[in-house]
Image (tube, rainbow, N blue to C red):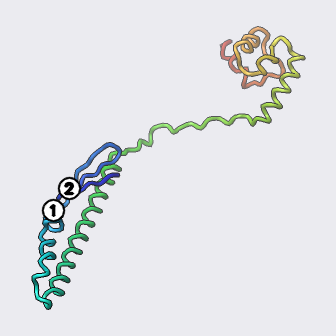
Amino acid sequence: MNITKDKNLIIITENGTTGQYVLNINTGEFLGKKGKLTAVLRGMGALTPEERPIIGQLANEVRAMLEEGIEVRKKAILDEVKRDKLRNEIIDVTLPGKRKDAGKLHPLAKVSRDRYITEMAKEYPQYGFEKHKGYGTKDHMEALRTYGPSPIHRKKFIRFLEDETK
């Protein structure tokens, strides 16, 4: 968030969007280089030694009140920006949530499964397990259509055959 102050205007820029909010006090008129309060502080040298502490204390109190007022207004502006931002961020709770991906096999489980499938390739050579290790390649699917499922095929894996016959 970037905040720029220009006389009595505060410009707040966030994520490429700009909102302008008016600060009620023209700070430059009082606190700037040519401000009224600055002129009073510069003129302190012309005062008598008895008047300086009184006028100095009064000027410092006025400055503190002005700066406090500016900070309060700035906070109110930032709160207004936050409210505007939240108002524009509407959450539609009727939308479906994001699905989590199903887990994957652990690398050791994959190695173990691949070894088992390589052994089964000797028992069921018509399926070509030695080439595809039982994964759903085009050749494997074609062998399933031609020879039907073997006893080692998982039921979830061969579900597509049932869908094709319906």
Q: Which residue, given by chain and number where applicable, does mark 1 sit on?
A: 26
Relative placement, left or right, of 78 versus 53 is right
The numbered disc on residue 6 is 2
Work out whether residue 13 or residue 166 is closer to the camera in this orientation and state it. 13
- Residue 160 horizontal/vertical position (percent): 68, 18
Q: Residue at x 17, y 62 (%)?
A: 24
Relative placement, left or right, of 17 versus 134 is left
Q: Going from the N terminus, do you reach mark 1 or mark 2 first?
A: 2
Q: Which residue is farthest bottom?
A: 50
- Residue 94 horizontal/vertical position (percent): 44, 40
Q: Callout 2: helix, strand or loop?
A: strand
124 up-or-down from 16: above or below: above
Work out whether residue 127 or residue 154 is closer to the camera in this orientation and state it. 127
Quadrant in the picture for the C terminus: top right
Asked whether the residues under the numbered discs 1 and 2 touch, taking CB atoms below 8 Å apart as contact, a structural biologist would say: no
Work out whether residue 10 or residue 94 is closer to the camera in this orientation and state it. 10
- Residue 120 horizontal/vertical position (percent): 87, 21
Image quarter of residue 35: bottom left
9 up-or-down from 18: above or below: below
Q: Residue at x 73, y 10 (%)?
A: 142
Relative placement, left or right, of 7 versus 84 is left
- Residue 19 horizontal/vertical position (percent): 25, 49
Please, what is the three-letter code of the amino acid marked with disc 1? Asn
Relative placement, left or right, of 165 versus 13 is right
